[in-house]
Amino acid sequence: MQSLKIWEDKIKEKRKSTPWREFLQEIVSWMPLNLYKNQNLISRFPPTTRSNIISTKQFEQERESLTHYGRDYDFEKDFFENIALLKKEIPFPNLMDYGWTEKCEYADITYNTKNVYLSFNSVWDNENIYYTLGTKGNCHNVFNGVHIWDNSSNIYSSASIIKSYNIFFSDFIINSNNIWMSRNLIGCEECIFCEDLENQKYCIENKSYEKEIYFNKKKEILRNKKNLGKIKSEKYGKNFWSSSISWSFIIDSENIINGVKVYQVKEGRNLILTWSEKWDERMYDVCVGGSWVSYDYAGACSSWTAQNIYICDSIGMSSNIYYSLNISDCSFCLGCIWLKNKSFCIFNKQYSKEEWYELADKIFASMEKDWILWDFFPWSLNPFYFNDTMAYLIDDSFTKEEVGKEGFMWRDEKIKVDIPEWAEIVYAKNPPVLSDIPLIKGDSQSGAKAGGLNDYQGFDENGNWKINPEILKKVIIDNDGNYYKIVPMEYDFLMKYGLPLPEVHWLERIKMGFKI
């Protein structure tokens, strides 16, 4: 046990000094933000030679047999050569679906959640999540969001929302409700066009009004659909209840260097979308992760409800996992891929506890000798197009030539979308802005090809905002040539809150919520 801690400390010590850009390139590039058609399946993996995929259903049926791929460690090769050979043999599911889920066939990385569509990383009791990255902990009815956590509901086109409801076109909101086009609010309600307020209500542009006057002004503001959108502000997310920290929207934390969207973490460096319920300690180089138990993440991407995780991707509900991929409900695994409910395995092969410690110690020693003990997986093993990952979303200064030299893949061509010949196309911006909104047209007119979204939305004769349900039958094309549709749950939400039809592709809406 003592020798294992020595290797852990050496890995942590190295990860404490990773430059930010290197962290993005090395680790955050393992977080894909796109979906592809691969072998007639919707997949997180693009159709390349780096991944052998099968359907998630078939994969789960075969998962118990993955120890059959177990192999002896070849000390004539370095560690990453060994794991490349194992990875080549094991099939991957088209999407990552952990635990209990329902109606999540078009979402990636889901756990104990229901009705998630074209979204990423939704865990723990969420429902009705659309076009969103990062929902956690009993969140409901979220559209076009990023980083929506802890009992938040009715969220639209917003980012970094914690314990809040009825939030629209807003960012960095905590313990608040009925907020429109605002940023950096805590403990507020009924605010519009506001910034940097605490425990306020009935405010417009940071000015407080009498309740009746406020609601009259609110009705007028929201009626003008040109008002509805993110406010133009260069401000970062404020840091609340934290000390000795740097960067943006760090909540109830301390001793954090380079943190973005961090919640209740006691010590760490290079953290993105990380959280804890009990003040996790010692988290270094972590992209999307957190736990209800305490301490020690070093070099991890998409790892949650786990502890003692070292150089891993996609680890759930596990402990003491080293240099492994896609592990759940396991402990003491080294160099393993896709195991579940296993312990004391190395390269998917089962060992006794004593055998495991002895062999692991030898492998770590050989890795240190090869000077790779603290490295993340080589870029030649990364199965994703670099410019389709969170790394590029955060920093688009990376070039194809720069990352190509390191072995990353890069997508040049647009993703092909199969549009039926009979589909009727609607242009998102024709006319380009929501000025002089017309009365909504009848069904006989709204089905014309090459129309614009404004042909399907407007005020009726009684002054009520309406969206023609015929839009559900159309395919929309935005100004960049991307195709998307409106789905029934989305339509109902837009109608309920008087919102206009979105004018950009669903993936671009996610990207809008994650600019650092």
Image (tube, rainbow, N blue to C red):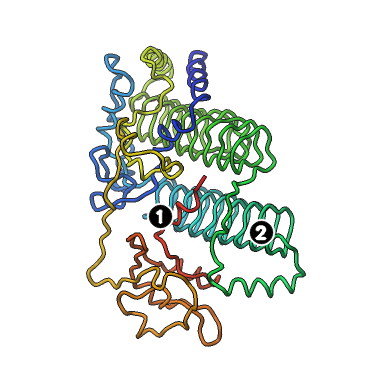
* Residue 252 in the image, given as x and y percentages of width and height: 66, 40
* Total count of labels: 2
Label 1 crowd bin: few (<14), some (14–19), many (20+), radius 10 Å: some
- The amino acid type found where label 2 is placed reads Cys
- What residue sits 26% from the left and 55% below the top? 416
Between 236 and 254, the one lying in front of the other is 236
Looking at the image, is mark 1 or mark 2 earlier in the sequence?
2
* Residue 345 in the image, given as x and y percentages of width and height: 38, 25
Which residue carries the number 2 mark? 194
For the residue labelled by badge 1, is the local secondary structure a helix, a strand or a loop? helix
Which residue appears farthest toward the bottom when viewing the image?
A: 461
Which residue carries the number 1 mark? 507
- The amino acid type found where label 1 is placed reads Leu
Residue 295: image tag:
none
* Residue 514 in the image, given as x and y percentages of width and height: 49, 48
In the displayed structure image, the side of residue 141 where residue 106 appears, left or right: left
